[in-house]
Amino acid sequence: MSKSDLRKQETPLMTYQIRLKGQLKNDWAEWFEGQSITHEISGTTLLICQVPDQPALFGLLRRVRDLGMHLISVKQIQDSKDQPC
């Protein structure tokens, strides 16, 4: 096992809830691969995602910006290694 693999195993994942105004089109869902995407009745989109660090979170937020989506909120909901998105 490489040092990179060991670091990945040791790094706890942080889970975030990202709420967006409007509904993310299915065509763009691949930009958020591995993340849970829920279209809410209120017309918003909820992303539940796990990231290893803040730079990865900022990468997701850049994707939101690049899509022109309006960011409503970002909330850390838990730290977990075991729960997939």
Image (cartoon, rainbow, N blue to C red):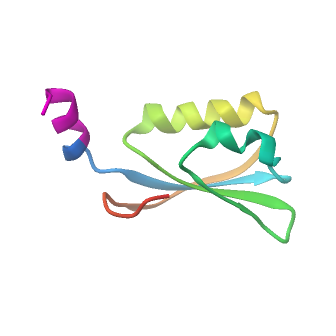
- Side of 59 relative to 79 (left or right): right
Give percent across and percent down for residue 52: 37, 42
- Residue 10 within the magenta-colored segment of the rendering: no
Between residues 21 and 1, which one lies in front from this camera angle? 1
The main secondary structure of the magenta stretch is helix
Residue 3 figure quarter: top left
- Residue 4 within the magenta-colored segment of the rendering: yes
Give percent across and percent down for residue 23: 84, 53
Q: Please state the total of marks drawn on the protein image.
A: 0
- Side of 73 relative to 9 (left or right): right
Residue 47 figure quarter: bottom right
What's drawn in magenta, residue-wise?
A: 1-8
Position of 59 relative to 81 (above/below):
above
- Side of 72 relative to 2 (left or right): right
Q: Residue at x 74, y 28 (%)?
A: 66
Give percent across and percent down for residue 40: 78, 67
Residue lying furthest bottom: 41
Image quadrant holding the N terminus, namely top left
Q: Residue at x 79, y 41 (%)?
A: 27
Residue lying furthest front: 1
Between residues 22 and 1, which one lies in front from this camera angle? 1
- Side of 29 relative to 34 (left or right): right
Give percent across and percent down for residue 63: 67, 32
Q: Residue at x 75, y 57 (%)?
A: 45
Q: Residue at x 40, y 52 (%)?
A: 14
Position of 36 relative to 9 (above/below):
below
